[in-house]
Image (spheres, rainbow, N blue to C red):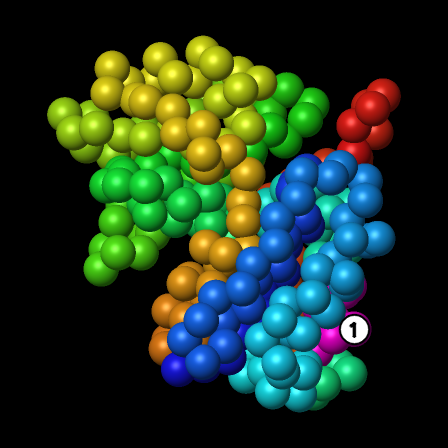
């Protein structure tokens, strides 16, 4: 089994997780604007707990977005630093997929994940379970809440997860079978470990120079709102 370190700072949450010799180690905190101060100490703690070093890793998985511009930059830059220093490959994991995986771990079979994207929009994507893992249906998108449309089976239960449903509760009316999983409101690096194993099996890891953040809103001039990033 591969030894994987996963990192995420793309939302309000800051998390790190480690898979070593079949055992998981994880740290998670909701600490807006403190990601850069917390993440490396989390990593050091996990490695120490497992009794390994960065050199023992097979790959570093990172939250590639979507999420806050600042959070994505912190995650990718710290991943670059760690991967370059230890000469390790990297693999990007969707934050939306990580939330969907959390909901699936809680029993969901169909999931729509949405993160507040500020400026009156949400980042969102839809998933079904396949072999215990989240499989994306359609594309990741950024849109106004009223433009979100479901392509899942509305005759079967659909689970909603993410801060998008907290900010825009009207999204819960997309389907009569939509129920919210409040335990999966933010991405967690622990769920990224499972998705990273699948990505490794598919050969999707890359050299660190090919690390690719996903903003979804690449062409929009970012407006900093009071109290938001």
> Foreground: 157 or 37?
37
Q: Main secondary structure of the magenta part?
A: helix
The residue sitting at 54% across, 45% down in the picture is 187
> Foreground: 58 or 116?
58
The residue sitting at 35% across, 13% down in the picture is 173
Dot 1 corresponds to which residue? 81
Viewer can see residue 143: no
Q: Position of residue 112 (x, y in %)?
A: 38, 34
Q: Is residue 123 left or right of residue 197?
A: right
Relative to residue 47, is residue 137 depicted above or below?
above
Q: For the image shown, how many numbered marks are present on the structure?
A: 1
Q: Position of residue 21 (x, y in %)?
A: 45, 80
Magenta segment boundaries in residue numbering: 76-83
The residue sitting at 67% across, 74% down in the picture is 48
Instruction: Label 1: state its secondary structure.
Output: helix
Residue 77 among magenta residues: yes
> Foreground: 132 or 40?
40
Relative to residue 46, is residue 12 depicted above or below?
above
> Foreground: 1 or 152?
1
């Amino acid at each position: 089994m591969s030894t994987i370190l996963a990192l995420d700072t793309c939302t309000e949450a800051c998390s790190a997780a480690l898979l070593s010799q079949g055992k998981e180690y994880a740290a998670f905190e909701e600490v807006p604007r403190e990601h850069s101060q917390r993440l490396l100490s989390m990593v050091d703690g996990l490695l120490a707990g497992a009794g390994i070093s960065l050199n023992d890793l097979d790959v570093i998985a990172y939250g590639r977005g979507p999420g806050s511009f600042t959070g994505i930059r912190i995650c990718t830059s710290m991943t670059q630093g760690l991967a370059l220093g230890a000469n390790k490959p990297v693999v990007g994991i969707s934050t939306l997929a990580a939330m969907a995986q959390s909901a699936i771990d809680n029993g969901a079979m169909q999931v729509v994940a949405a993160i507040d994207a500020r400026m009156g929009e949400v980042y969102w994507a839809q998933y079904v379970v396949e072999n215990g893992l989240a499989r994306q249906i359609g594309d990741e998108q950024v849109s106004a809440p009223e433009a979100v449309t479901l392509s899942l089976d509305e005759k079967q239960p659909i689970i909603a997860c993410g801060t998008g449903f907290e900010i825009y509760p009207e999204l819960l009316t997309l389907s009569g079978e939509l129920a919210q999983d409040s335990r999966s409101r933010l991405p967690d690096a622990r769920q990224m470990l499972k998705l990273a194993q699948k990505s490794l099996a598919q050969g999707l890891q890359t050299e660190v120079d090919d690390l690719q953040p996903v903003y979804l809103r690449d062409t929009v001039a970012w407006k900093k709102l009071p109290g938001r990033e």
